[in-house]
Image: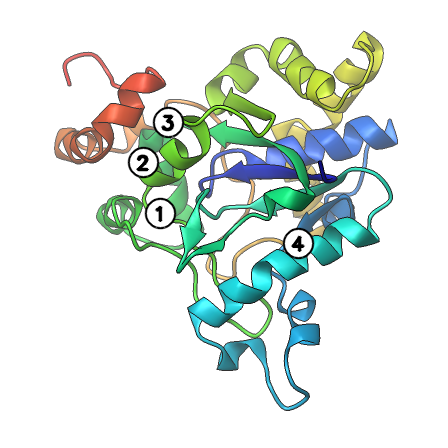
Amino acid sequence: MGNILWIASYPKSGNTWVRSFIQNYLSNQRSDINDMHRQSIDEIKSFRYQPYLSADQATTDLDLTTICAIRPNVHADIAAAAQGTVFVKSHNFQGQYENYPLHNWSVSSGAIYVVRNPLDVAVSLSHYFDYTIDDAISYMADDMAGTPNEPENVPQIITSWSLNVSSWTQEPGNNLLVLRYEDLLKNPKKYFRKVESLLGLKKDPKRLTKAIHASSFKNLKQQEQQSGFVEKHENAGAFFRSGTANQWQKVLSKEQVERLVNDHREQMERFKYIPPGY
């Protein structure tokens, strides 16, 4: 067993919130959001892939298959460089591309996967990427959805919301903890305690409460307003915008809700996300 613990999710589903909780819990103090990448590594950073390229190559010169062939080596490097458990962020679906695994399980110890109501994800995506709601809904239904090959970041293979969720949650094993975003909102002590337990830490109610408060949406938003957030997308007005559940009720039309339910019914039923009447 390896030492990478994946913090995985479809985009805009609570990945950063969980990583912030872990950062604050382990430091036992209110931590700077712009130091989060030191505690929870982003495996898509192109500099991690550069050692496997010739001197005159950049990752933007590579096709997706070549990048995916390098990926397991990058994960092995991350694991080897770490002292103990290392938390690695992922929006990739759990699977393979051209027979290359997107997550190197030979150097991994497990994963936390966060799932969020796709009706709210559509609203968040539209604000974050400056999409229309309809474009966000189309993106979420695209089995080939991903991110581009950029100078700073190699591509992610996200797939559709349904494929991403099912790929991480339908097969047992891999020491996996699945959390619903809405449960974290409703009962943070109960569900963040599950994170504490997965990390192999003893029950510490005071430390747990302190970390929950330090990683609250209010605190994270306040930090971003004061000093910015390095992980914010260039098209986003803010990374931490609302953070609530059921915002879709004031934003989505009946037709848009129907599109999302029709696109994702099976996984929405599994996680009790289908609204009455649909």
- Would you call the spot at circle 4 few (<14 residues within 10 Å), some (14-19), or many (20 or more)? many
Q: Residue at x 46, y 60 (%)?
A: 235
User: Type of residue at label 1?
Assistant: Ser
Q: Which residue is mark 3?
A: 117
Colour scheme of this structure image? rainbow
Res 162 label: 2
Are dots 1 and 3 in contact, CB under 8 Å?
Answer: no
Q: Quadrant of the C terminus?
A: top left
Camera-nearest label, 1 or 3? 3
Front in this rendered view, residue 26 or 107: 107
On the image, the x and y values in percent for residue 176 come to: 57, 26
Give the CA separation, mark 3 to mark 2: 11 Å
Front in this rendered view, residue 1 or 14: 1
User: Type of residue at label 2?
Assistant: Ser
Front in this rendered view, residue 246 or 194: 194
Q: Which residue is mark 4?
A: 75
Give the CA separation, mark 4 to mark 1: 31 Å
Q: Residue at x 66, y 74 (%)?
A: 52
Q: Which residue is mark 1?
A: 126
